[in-house]
């Protein structure tokens, strides 16, 4: 039955996710790399079973190069599956890497494919499995960097040349594996998480589609989910922080790379020599790019890079898993050739960060991507804000009152303190939306079909919209906009969804980022609210990049519901917005 479910999900991905690799819209031009040569004939075994620490059997397959020189040893790349997939996900890329002289082992993480056990989401059992796999490889294969005696017995494996690589869950396992086993020298992690709590609970908001439906419901169809995952999900969706906060946050932090930042940065009291490449996607609503930035900035290694690409979760990488030409997988080869085969590929000549423009064929190579450190108290002691050295000052636009006869309130460069207020109420059909779950992000990334709204048809009772003046020149945004609002709710808990649009002369808005926000009476991630009392709350949008064209305006639109997200405990409320010097939108323009 499990194999049938895996086949069903593979077909599902080919029909709906993989097409996101076929790009009809403009795409950035990638740098050219110098790669290691394909010199080796290869062998492949599909009958590998590795026993882990607790007796659980991990099913794997392995590509091995045929030696050209006597006693030749090879670097190793270990590739764990992504969510709902299994060990054969990377066979096309594994074959390519093996021809260049890598031993490549793909495996089904426990609970997936034919592997035994329960899905562990990067917990202690998954980490023990990685150790067992490395031990097995060193025992049975000629791993480069391993010292043996004359009889072939291993006497020192500290310098074993081992890398890990994967997508989604596989990316997270690869990144966590490097923290738990120092024999791992290089990782290439595609759409991983750096902070699992921040990824799954953005601005204290649950994700009805990507979390509950994709992770839990679809995951349960295909894998053997630990019942704890379902229990944690249900706890998160109740928003009962008094009862569940410690349970949820401890579970998430144990599985968050940012909780192990010292292990990445130091080894035996010295700076650790490790190569970490991260590749995340701008339309990723599973693991939004915000949460990976703080982890990246915390890394001290000189061998690090982060690329933010157009694509939904696992979308930008999809075609490469089939062996087809793919920018992300080209980078995989360049990263490992550079750091495991010591080929001067050119990848280290680039700036350490890059980001795609969501609307043009430009990719920007930069030293820093702006994000403000707000609402991260749960990371106290793990994350040091001093590592986030923002090199730009965002431009502020102050919110202003919307007269009854106007469609828009103002976004102005000067403060608009006023005794007048605006009120919206809950309800669907506001006319504003972040789009169709999964579909809109895919269309935006791959066809340049963006989510648009004609603002004259929006419901003024259920939404509030603010606009800037017309821009007189092109302006490029790179980074994470944020907004501070003064709100008086009628209930202790409420939800809003803030959207940023470019706005044309016909009042058609084109969405370029958004952010949900859920405020509770007993919340631990965000400031709390009380019915009838004003609260000032600041929060980040999802990190983005685009060019605002001359003749366009920027619009901030706020409503209270979105099909992508779970709701607040209170579902019938009003929000009153008031205006002073603290009520403002901040946008990181770079020119």
Image (spheres, helix red, strand yellow):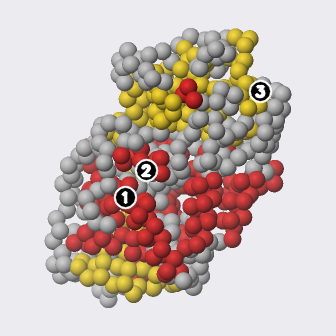
Please indicate whether residue 571 sits to the left or right of residue 311 in the image: right
Q: In this view, does 384 lie above or below 45?
A: above
Please indicate whether residue 370 sits to the left or right of residue 215 in the image: left
Question: Are the residues at dot 1 and dot 2 in contact (C-beta closer than 8 Å)?
Answer: yes
Tag 1 residue: 19
Tag 2 residue: 442
Which numbered dot is residue 61? none
Tag 3 residue: 488
Residue nearest the observer in this picture, 173 or 588: 588
Query: Within 10 angstroms of label 1, few (less than 14), some, or many (20 or more) residues?
Result: some
Residue nearest the observer in this picture, 35 or 545: 545
Quadrant placement of the N terminus: bottom right
Which element carries disc 3, helix, strand or loop?
A: strand
Residue nearest the observer in this picture, 512 or 244: 512
Query: Within 10 angstroms of label 2, few (less than 14), some, or many (20 or more) residues?
Result: many
Q: Is residue 555 above or below residue 404?
A: below
| Residue 552 image point, x, y percent | 42, 22
At x 48%, y 24%, the residue is 507
| Residue 500 image point, x, y percent | 52, 31
At x 40%, y 65%, the residue is 14
Q: Distance between the residues labelled 2 and 3?
A: 36 Å
At x 45%, y 85%, the residue is 49
> Is residue 269 visible in this depiction of the protein?
no
Query: Within 10 angstroms of label 3, few (less than 14), some, or many (20 or more) residues?
Result: many
Q: Say which quarter of the image contains residue 141.
A: bottom left
Query: Which dot, 1 or 3, sits closer to the camera?
Result: 1
Which element carries disc 1, helix, strand or loop?
A: helix
């Amino acid at each position: 039955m499990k194999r049938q479910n895996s086949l069903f999900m593979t077909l599902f991905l080919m029909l709906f996710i993989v097409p996101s690799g076929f790009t009809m819209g403009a795409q950035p031009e990638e740098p050219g790399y110098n790669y290691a040569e394909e010199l080796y004939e290869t062998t492949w075994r599909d009958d590998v079973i590795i026993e882990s620490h607790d007796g659980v059997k991990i099913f794997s397959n392995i590509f091995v190069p045929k030696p050209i020189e006597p006693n030749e040893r090879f670097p190793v790349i270990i590739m764990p599956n992504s969510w709902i997939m299994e060990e054969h996900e990377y066979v096309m890329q594994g074959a390519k890497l093996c021809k260049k002289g890598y031993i490549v082992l793909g495996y089904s993480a426990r609970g997936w494919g034919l592997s035994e056990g329960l899905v562990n989401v990067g917990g202690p059992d998954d980490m023990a499995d990685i150790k067992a796999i490395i031990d097995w490889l060193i025992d049975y294969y000629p791993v480069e960097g391993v010292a043996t005696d004359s009889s072939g017995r291993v006497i020192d494996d500290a310098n074993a040349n081992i890398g890990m690589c994967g997508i989604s869950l596989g990316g997270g396992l690869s990144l966590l594996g490097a923290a738990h086993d120092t024999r791992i020298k290089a990782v290439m992690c595609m759409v991983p998480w750096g902070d699992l709590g921040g990824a799954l609970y953005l601005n204290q908001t649950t994700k009805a589609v990507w979390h509950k439906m994709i992770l839990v419901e679809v995951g349960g169809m295909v894998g053997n989910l630990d019942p704890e995952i379902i229990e944690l999900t249900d706890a998160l969706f109740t928003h009962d922080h008094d009862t569940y906060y410690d349970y949820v946050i401890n579970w998430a932090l144990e599985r968050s790379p940012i909780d192990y930042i010292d292990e990445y940065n130091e080894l035996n009291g010295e700076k650790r020599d490790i190569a970490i490449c991260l590749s995340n996607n701008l339309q990723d609503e599973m693991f939004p790019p915000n949460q990976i930035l703080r982890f990246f900035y915390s890394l001290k290694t000189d061998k690090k890079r982060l690329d933010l690409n157009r694509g939904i979760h696992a979308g930008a990488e999809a075609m490469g898993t089939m062996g087809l030409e793919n920018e992300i997988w080209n980078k995989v080869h360049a990263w490992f050739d550079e750091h495991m085969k010591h080929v001067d590929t050119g990848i280290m000549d680039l700036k350490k960060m890059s980001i795609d423009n969501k609307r043009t064929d430009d990719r920007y190579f930069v030293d820093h991507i702006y994000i403000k450190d707000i609402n991260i108290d749960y990371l106290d002691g793990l994350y040091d804000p001093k590592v986030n050295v923002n090199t730009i000052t965002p431009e502020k636009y102050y919110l202003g009152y919307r007269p009854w006869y106007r469609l828009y309130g103002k976004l102005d460069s000067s403060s608009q303190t006023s005794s007048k207020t605006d009120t919206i109420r809950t309800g669907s059909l506001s006319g504003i939306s972040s789009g169709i779950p999964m579909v809109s992000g895919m269309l935006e990334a791959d066809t340049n079909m963006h989510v648009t709204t004609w603002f004259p048809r929006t419901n003024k009772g259920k939404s509030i919209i603010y606009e800037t003046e017309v821009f007189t020149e092109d302006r490029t945004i790179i980074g994470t906009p944020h907004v501070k609002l003064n709100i008086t709710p009628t209930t202790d808990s409420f939800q809003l969804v803030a959207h940023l649009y470019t706005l044309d002369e016909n009042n058609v808005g084109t969405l370029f980022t958004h952010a949900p926000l859920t405020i509770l009476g007993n919340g631990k991630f965000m400031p709390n609210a009380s019915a009838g009392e004003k609260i000032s709350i600041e929060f980040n949008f999802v990190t983005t990049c685009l060019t605002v064209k001359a003749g366009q305006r920027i619009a901030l639109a706020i409503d209270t519901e979105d099909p992508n997200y779970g709701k607040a405990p209170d579902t019938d409320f009003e929000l009153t917005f008031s205006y002073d010097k603290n009520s403002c939108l901040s946008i990181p323009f770079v020119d």
